[in-house]
Image (tube, helix red, strand yellow):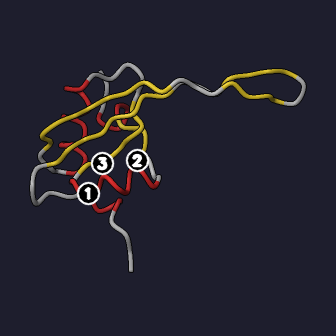
Amino acid sequence: MKTARDVIIRPMVSEKSYAGLEQNRYTFLVARGANKTEIKEAVQQIWNVRVLRVNTMNRKGKAKRFRYTKGKRPDQKLAVVTLAEGDSIEIFETRS
């Protein structure tokens, strides 16, 4: 049985993810085998918020050179979670 912390790996911190905060959207790196229902329940359980929508995307790993050989970064699954009006997650809030 997967726990909520097994599904949500970490929040994604980038300019694009911070732009989504205005629309109450948060981006997370999630387990590759997680589905939208599991992601929704995990976010609701960890941060005690109401999730309206979950969009997922699979991102292919880049091909890179590692010393003398060619390698590949691992593939990742991202989830963009839209929260209900008035709900927010504190880890994304900017400090002034």
**Whether label 1 touches label 2, CB < 8 Å:** yes
Query: Which amino acid does the dot numbered 1 rest on?
Result: Ile
Classify 10 Å Cα crowding around label 1: few (below 14), some (14-19), many (20 and above).
Answer: some
Circle 2 sits in a helix, a strand or a loop, which is it? strand
Residue 22: % across, % down: 25, 59
Q: CA distance from mark 1 to mark 2?
A: 11 Å
User: Furthest residue to the bottom?
Assistant: 96
Residue 11, labelled with which disc? 2
Q: Is residue 45 above or below residue 34?
A: below
Q: CA distance from mark 2 to mark 3?
A: 8 Å
Residue 87: % across, % down: 14, 57
Task: Tell me the residue that label 3 is attached to.
Answer: 26
Tell me which numbered mark, 1 or 2, is placed earlier along the sequence.
2
Query: Which amino acid does the dot numbered 2 rest on?
Result: Pro
Residue 66: % across, % down: 81, 29
Q: CA distance from mark 3 to mark 1?
A: 8 Å
**Whether label 3 touches label 1, CB < 8 Å:** yes
Circle 3 sits in a helix, a strand or a loop, which is it? strand
